[in-house]
Amino acid sequence: MTQSDFQKKLQAYIHLTRFDKPVGIELLLWPTLWAVFLAAFGRSINQATQASTALPSVLPPWSILLIFALGAILMRAAGCAINDFADRKVDGSVTRTKGRPLADGRLSSKEAVAAFLVLSLISASLLLWLPLEVFYWSLGAVLLAFIYPFMKRYTHLPQVFLAAAFGWAIPMAYVAVQGSSDMWCWLLFIAYMCWTVAYDTQYAMADRDDDLKIGVKSTAILFGRYDVVIISVLQTAFLVLMALVFYHYFSQTSIGLIPVFALGLVAILFSKQNKACATGNPMACFNAFLDNVWVGRYVFLVVALSCFWIEFTAIA
């Protein structure tokens, strides 16, 4: 293989795993880190309550943050590889995806499956530095990551399977930090699923005409003319559930209800997205989907800055 051929093959693998499109990485990464921070905060609350002492450090170990960040990046890449394998026969018929490496022949099906397995194994190796219980939970993540790309052939709810696959990092984070999941873990998980189904429906709205032609199912097709209304309901559910989670963790601390009120900016972002989607323009819907990266970043900043504020005001 010449250097030119190697560069072309490397570029094809980068396109397969979407490392050239970091928005998808961020949509998985930031919520994973929300969970790590909130799980660490919850652990500190539990320890302080049981021992009747002052609140210990509320910040998660940096090693846990790094492991989950790398795991999110690697599993998202693995998910993209198996997604392209599942869609290899239809991507060529969709305007937006006909340039993907399996659709245009730059990579073979075997190479895509191999990429999925290698990335999954590398991600699994990170579990060696986490409690054994996290390994058992990770099996669910791998199963969901493998099956969700195929769901669009059998159900109009593939976005729900995507949300579960992406969101499975949340209970894993709680188990890694606290030793078990709790009610607040699952409220956060459900909130994340509502948000993910909403933004992935926006994504599917951009492809709806092509999907109808080739017989691929999606929530955008299922919701039909009520798509923006249902997206709004899901976004509202996300905001309500996140407000409950923030109230539980922060209302009795020095930062009070500021994190809850901070969600108002997310509501404004959602309103802007829905106005764009209401036009029915595919590119407007796709841009609304892309805007969700700012939701992930912003909520992470709210969570992280709240935890750091409480940590350092407690020390002072």
Image (cartoon, rainbow, N blue to C red):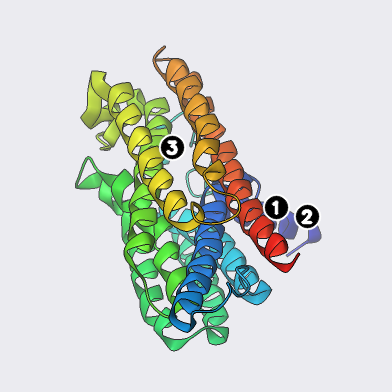
x then y, percent, for residue 279 = 42, 11
Is residue 90 visible to us here?
no
Outermost residue, right direction? 3
Task: Mark 1: give few (<14), some (14-19) or many (20+) Cα within 10 Å.
Answer: few
Distance of mark 3 from mark 1, alpha carbons?
20 Å
Q: Disc 1 residue type?
A: Lys
Q: Which label was assigned to residue 8?
A: 1
As measured in the structure, the alpha-carbon distance from the residue carrying label 1 to the one carrying label 2 is 6 Å
Helix, strand or loop status at disc 1 = helix
Query: For residue 199, what is the image quadrant?
Result: top left
Foreground mark, 3 or 2? Answer: 3
Residue 136 visible in image: yes
Residue receiving disc 3: 92
State the quadrant of the N terminus.
bottom right
Q: In x, y percent, where is residue 29?
A: 56, 55
Out of 68 and 213, give the one closest to the viewer. 68
Contact flag, marks 3 and 1 (Cβ < 8 Å) = no
Q: Which mark is residue 82?
A: none
Where does label 2 land, which residue?
A: 4
Measured as percent of width and height from the top left, residue 86 is found at 36, 53
Residue 33 placement (x, y as % from top left): 56, 59
Side (left or right) of 69 relative to 148: right
Callouts 3 and 2 close, C-beta under 8 Å: no
Q: Out of 45 and 9, give the one closest to the viewer.
A: 45
Q: Residue furthest top?
A: 279
Cβ atoms at labels 1 and 2 below 8 Å apart: yes
Cα distance in 3D space between marks 3 and 2: 25 Å
Dot 3 falls on a residue whose secondary structure is: helix
The amino acid type, in three-letter code, at marker 3 is Gly
